[in-house]
Amino acid sequence: MRLIKLLSLAMIVVSATCTAKPLDSGKFMKENVNFSKKQINKEIKMIEKSGKLLNPTTLKKDGTVFYCDYTDWRSGFFPGSVWYLYQLTKDKTYLPLAKKYSKAIEEAKNITWNHDVGFMIGCSFGNGYKLTKDPEYKDIIIQTAKSLSTRFRKVPGIIQSWDADKGWQAQRGWQCPVIIDNMMNLELLFEATRLSGDSTYYKFAVSHANRTLAEHFRPDGSCYHVVDYSMVDGSVRHRQTAQGYSDESVWSRGQAWAIYGFAVCYRETGNPVYLNQALKTFAFMKNHPRLPKDLIPYWDMDAPKIPDEPRDVSSAACIASALYEISTFDIPNASSYKLYADRILYSLGTPAYRAKLGTNGNFLLMHSVGSIPHNSEINVPLNYADYYFLEALSRKKNIEAK
Ligand code: GLY
């Protein structure tokens, strides 16, 4: 009996040692950067051969690649991924390509009919500016901030995400719908103030962040997708969802946007309330009883058929990237956020999520979800999952180089 007990204890220790064995970080980085390079090179070769400025976005239902135009909210992610490849590999052949693919979407700087210009221009020209300091890119970033600022609504003190009188949004009866995703557009406003000296953009970003902090979150730290404000008195009219399972459910990508967006606000302002919110939302996801062991969330943590529900790799990649940033802040237990981000990234790098070379429409990662309520992009690759994966690799590399 005693022997059996001892043997089982030994087995537990051995298996704990095996599962706890840390992955060789250098080897992981090298292998994943090499893979990303080879996979994206295949796509670049195809694009260059076509003679067109194609912008790969996702896979269509027939398995072919969907290429978007500059007006699509996802148009900045592929150029941004090429900028990250340039940064990660120092391979100069990426530089003219990153410039050319960014230039192809420049007109997005003038879009005033939605809030997504921060994603479009920030991920493309924003990264380009960090790497080249090209004055033309600076002007493009400032022009984009001007366009985004036209959507600031004084009465609720918020940037309106979607127009309420067009498309499927017009069916919802909203006045001033704001989605948590909008937090991701604030980084461009902070940058525009730095570049132009005009503090208006900074003030709009802070006002938006403060109102979102007050209205978008539940006591447990999770967030709503959509909050609709009154244009008359600024009050909240509805708290709802558009891409989640239900109004009260936890749409995973929304939580990722919140964690990332408020971490950026803390970086830019130093106001600890923003960091507290990012950490609270992260803790909610981390401790969620339905979060799978491999740390890749379901598309919605309240989806009814869990565990038989699609995962959303894009939310995992975005959370990992945000956690690398958080781990660089001068805060208690900063390194624990890096360790958790490493665990997500290692999971994304396994064959369960990372595609085989030459498959998956030449996208890096599989298994993301665009919008189940719209029956659109379910269990597919998405260019923003790849973008945040590359950004996470780049942040990990910079942290480990120190
Ligand atoms: N910003 C749109 C989405 O997260 O699907």
Image (tube, helix red, strand yellow):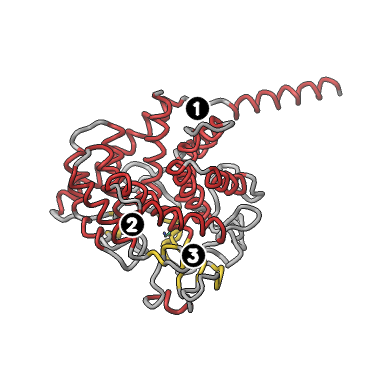
Task: Report the mark closest to the observer, 1 or 3.
Answer: 3
Which is nearer the N-term, disc 1 or disc 3? 1
In the visual, does 134 lie left or right of 121? left
Horizontal and vertical percent position of residue 373: 49, 68
Alpha carbon distance from label 1 to label 3: 35 Å
Residue 279 appears in view: yes
Query: Which residue is at 38% across, 49% downward?
Result: 187
Mark 2 touching mark 1, by CB under 8 A?
no
Horizontal and vertical percent position of residue 220: 65, 53
Q: Which mark is residue 74?
A: 2
> Measured along the vertical axis of the image, is residue 362 above or below residue 236?
above
Alpha carbon distance from label 2 to label 1: 33 Å
What amino acid type is highlighted by mark number 2? Arg
Tell which of 166 and 285 is nearer to you: 166
Quadrant containing the N terminus is top right
What amino acid type is highlighted by mark number 3? Gln
Which is nearer the N-term, disc 3 or disc 2? 2
Q: Residues within 10 Å of mark 1 (few under 14, many from 20)?
A: few
Quadrant containing the C terminus is top left
What amino acid type is highlighted by mark number 1? Leu
Horizontal and vertical percent position of residue 32: 38, 34
Number of numbered callouts drawn: 3
Q: Quadrant of ligand 1?
A: bottom left
- Tell me: is circle 3 under 8 Å from ligand 1: yes
Judging by the rendered image, the residue that carries numbered circle 1 is: 23
Residue 45 appears in which quarter of the rendering?
top left
Q: Residues within 10 Å of mark 2 (few under 14, many from 20)?
A: many
Which is nearer the N-term, disc 2 or disc 1? 1
> Measured along the vertical axis of the image, is residue 361 above or below residue 27?
below
Judging by the rendered image, the residue that carries numbered circle 3 is: 243
